[in-house]
Image (cartoon, rainbow, N blue to C red):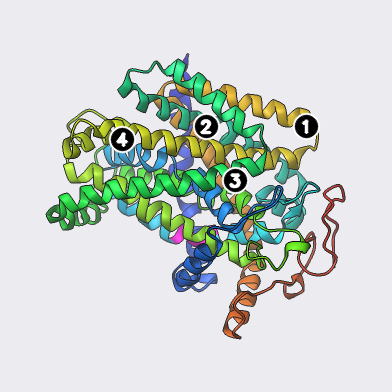
Amino acid sequence: MEAMLNDAISTINGYLWSYFIIFILIGAGLFFTMTTNFVQIRMIKEMIRLVINGAGSSTEKNHVSSFQAFCVSTASRVGVGNIAGIAIAVVLGGPGAIFWMWVIALIGAATGFIESTLAQIYKEPVAKGGFYGGPAYYIRYGLNNKALSVLFAILISITYGWIYNSVQANTLAASLQVFNFDVSYTGAVVAILLGIIIFGGISRVAKASEIIVPIMAVLYIATALFVVIMNITQFPHVIYTIISSAFEPVAAGGGLLGATVMNGIKRGLFSNEAGEGSVPNAAANAGVDPPLLQSRISVNHPVEQGLVQAFGVFLDTFIICTASAFIVLIVGDYSTTGLTGVALVQHNLEQQLGSWAPTAVAIFIVMFSFSSLIGNYYYGEINISHLTDKKFYLHLFRIGVIIMTFVGSIASLDLVWNLADLFMAFLVLTNISSIVRMGRTAGLALDDYIKQRKAGIETPVFNRSVLNHTYGIVWWGDGQTTDSSVPPTPVE
């Protein structure tokens, strides 16, 4: 039964990704790159400045700082896709898959900027403090389409809270088998720990991410750099192999560029999530109420989070994913070992660093996966809250997250990854079709931000009056409200 289901989902994925998703993602990324005049490249210095300024900020109650929002989104981005997913992409698509992963990240950063800026513009204050927002919110209020917003909220809650968490739990449990831990016991322990955090609320999620993400990223990058330095003479050859292989026929998957492009883009998107509509949920939560408006943790302009989250795409793909690619390619036996995913990375590091390396990778996987479990849940909570304010349904969702974390630990690898690809496609279709129609709004906000910065204003302040319309925008400018019991009202 499981094999039949896996085959059916794989077939559907083949059609969706081959004929729709790849062209939609690349097309949207190029469109936003052109309409923003290459915002992801010309404003990278500003991105770094904003991330650095937000680090170390303190928060009150349920407020989330700009840096914490960055860490929560990175917690979701930086997971098994950065280790296991990259190894899978190389095995199935060859070294050239990494080149196409870079391409989708470069143009996808513009898409990430647009969606996160829109999330800030249409964010909604919460009575207990902080904000909720994301595609469900900007689709509902920016496009005035309630039905589509409900569909997206349901899709992302299932995809991240249940499906993606199954993928993370599966790889986490597999990595710990190096210690001969039974996957069912591992799944049970992870599910219990996750339950303790998610029942503590969003502020606990943000604080946990702020601690875990920087530590795991630095340690993993340091390990990968050490491997590169040890093999520095092979470094130019690895780069050459990645670029030259990107345009060679690959037998797997049949057809010129098929497997190479497909796996590079799919694994790249799973990792950096640009255009998928997930990161905007974290981006919208950054900010504080008016009494704290002058504190340095506030988001004074929607473009701030747009730029910060665009930088997150670069961090994820060009640094962390590329580090994994080097580990796999420097050893060079990815096509002969019969291994894939985390097992291949553990094998290669063992060849380079010794018998202790698989244990180190297992620890990295635990940190990466657990941070992603937290970030994925966070997206679900935001969207469940968009659907209903009844705590009963939120608690049901939380219980489902815990159950699926355990189920994912013992399920087959192929099935959980195929399910992830299927639901990823649905999210992309819904989100991209929406933000293409709303891109002009984010573009006007960007023009306003740049104008203020050129005028010498270090911290631009946004007012919704600079937009061509203010329908559904309840936070920026006059008439702000902090009472979430009052639904957003059209403001003309």
Dot 2 amino acid type:
Asn
Label 2 crowding class (10 Å Cα cut-off): few <14, some 14-19, many 20+? many
- Dot placed on the residue nearer the N-terminal end, 3 or 4: 3
Dot 3 amino acid type:
Ala
- The residue that disc 2 covers is 165
Q: Secondary structure at mark 1?
A: helix
- The residue that disc 1 covers is 391
Residue under the point 46% across and 16% down = 185
Q: Secondary structure at mark 4?
A: helix
Q: Secondary structure at mark 3?
A: helix
Q: Quadrant of the C terminus?
A: bottom right
Indicate which label's residue lies in the foreground, 2 or 3. 3
Indicate which label's residue lies in the foreground, 1 or 2. 1
Location of residue 151 in the rendering, given as x and y in whole percent from the top left corner? 69, 40
Looking at this rendering, what residue extends furthest in the bottom direction?
455
Indicate which label's residue lies in the foreground, 1 or 4. 4
- Dot placed on the residue nearer the N-terminal end, 2 or 3: 2
Tell me where the magenta segment starts and ends, as one range: 107-112
- The residue that disc 4 covers is 360
Dot 1 amino acid type:
Lys
- The residue that disc 3 covers is 206
The quadrant where residue 349 appears: top left
Q: Secondary structure at mark 2?
A: helix
